[in-house]
Image (spheres, rainbow, N blue to C red):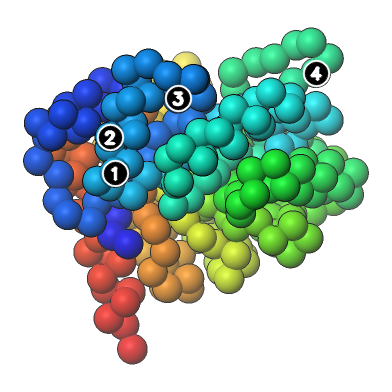
Amino acid sequence: MRAGIGLRLPHLAAVAAGEAALPPGLWLEVHAENFMVDGGPRLTALLDVAERFPVSLHGVGLALAGTRMAPRGHLRRLGQLCDRVQPVLVSDHLAWQRAGDWHVPDFLPFARTRRALAIAITNVGRAQDALGRRLLVENPSHYADVGGHTFAEADFLAELAAATGCGLLVDVNNIHVSAHNLGLDAGWLVDQLPAAAVAEIHVAGHRPDPASPLLIDSHDAPVAEPVWALAARLLARTGPVPLLVERDAELPPLAELVAEAARGAALLAEVADAP
C-alpha cells in the first residue's frame, strides 16, 4: 500500500465523480461519523469511491479511554458502515469525551494509571467485538501534563496492544506537538514505541498558538520537516506500514495533498529498499 490522503467532504464529490486525477494505488481516509447514516448522497459518494480506492475509516467518537465509551447505537452504526465500505483500516483515538450525559467533541487527556489501562482494554475489546475486526488506536496530542501517571505513554500503548490485539495508529505530528509542549525529546518518544504493534502512521500539520508557547495540532497546514523526519525515524523501525497525510482545515487543492502523499510514498519506498 502506498501513502494515502485524508478525503474530506469538500473533495468527496469530485473524487466520486471521477473529476479528480488521483494516482493508482492511492488510499483514502474518511471520518467515519460523517457517513454513519442509512443513505443519502454523501454515503452514496463514499461507496462509489470505495469501489475504486482502498478506504480507511477514522473515527472520532468511541471515547476509548473513558468510563463511558460510545453507546451501543454508535457501535452498531459504525459496524454497518464497515460492512458497507469494507475498509482496509479502522481507527479511533485514545481519549475520553463523555461524563454522565455530558459529551464534548474533543479528545480529553487522562492519567495513565492501571485503572485507566483496564478501562481502555475493556473499551477496545468491546469495540473490536462489536465491529468484528481489529481496531487501530491513535496516540493523543498533549498541551499540559495532567500528572498522576503510572505508565509512560509508549508503555501504556504497548500494554493495550498486547492485551487486546489492537494495532497502533501513530500520529507523529501528535508526538512532535506533545514533545514541544511538554519539553520532551520527540525522537526519544518515537524510539520507545512498540514497533511491532504499529499498523499505520499519520503525518499532519500544526501551528504555533498566538497566545502562548504551545504548538496546536491544527491539521490546517502542510506537514512540517520535523514531522517528516519523525515519520522516517519510525518507519526505519517498523518497516513499510500505511502512511497517511491528514489535513482537516484550510484544505488545499487535491493535487497538493497528492504531492505530499508522494513524499510519503518515497519514504516507504526507501524503507522497503533498505538492506
Task: For marks 2 and 3, give the CA distance.
Answer: 13 Å
Find out whether the residues at labels 1 and 3 contact each other: C-beta distance under 8 Å.
no
- From the image, state whether disc 4 or disc 2 is nearer to you: 2
- The residue lying at 35 percent from left, 59 percent from top is 229
- The reply to whether the C-beta atoms of the residues labelled 1 and 2 are less than 8 Å apart is yes
Q: Between disc 1 and disc 3, whose residue precedes?
A: 3
Which one is earlier in the sequence, the residue at label 4 or at label 2? 2
**x, y (%) of residue 162?**
74, 64
Query: Residue at label 3?
Result: 35
Q: Residue furthest bottom?
A: 275
Residue designated by label 4? 99
Please tell me which of labels 4 and 1 falls first in the chain: 1
Q: Quote the CA–CA distance across marks 1 and 2.
A: 5 Å
User: Which residue is labeled 1 in the image?
Assistant: 51
Mark 2 highlights which residue?
A: 48
Q: CA distance from mark 4 to mark 2?
A: 37 Å
Q: Quadrant of residue 127?
A: top right
Q: Is residue 201 left or right of residue 92?
A: left
Q: Amino acid at mark 1?
A: Glu
Element assignment for label 2: helix
Say what amino acid the circle numbered 4 marks.
Answer: Ala
Which picture quadrant has residue 77?
top right
The residue that appears at 82% across and 45% down in the rendered structure is 122
Local SS, label 3: helix
Q: Secondary structure at mark 4?
A: strand
- Label 2 Cα neighbours within 10 Å, binned few <14 / some 14-19 / many ≥20: some
The three-letter code of the residue at mark 2 reads Asp
Real-space CA distance between mark 3 and mark 4, rounded to the nearest whole angstrom: 25 Å
Q: Is residue 248 above or below residue 234?
A: above
Residue 261: percent from left, percent from top: 24, 50
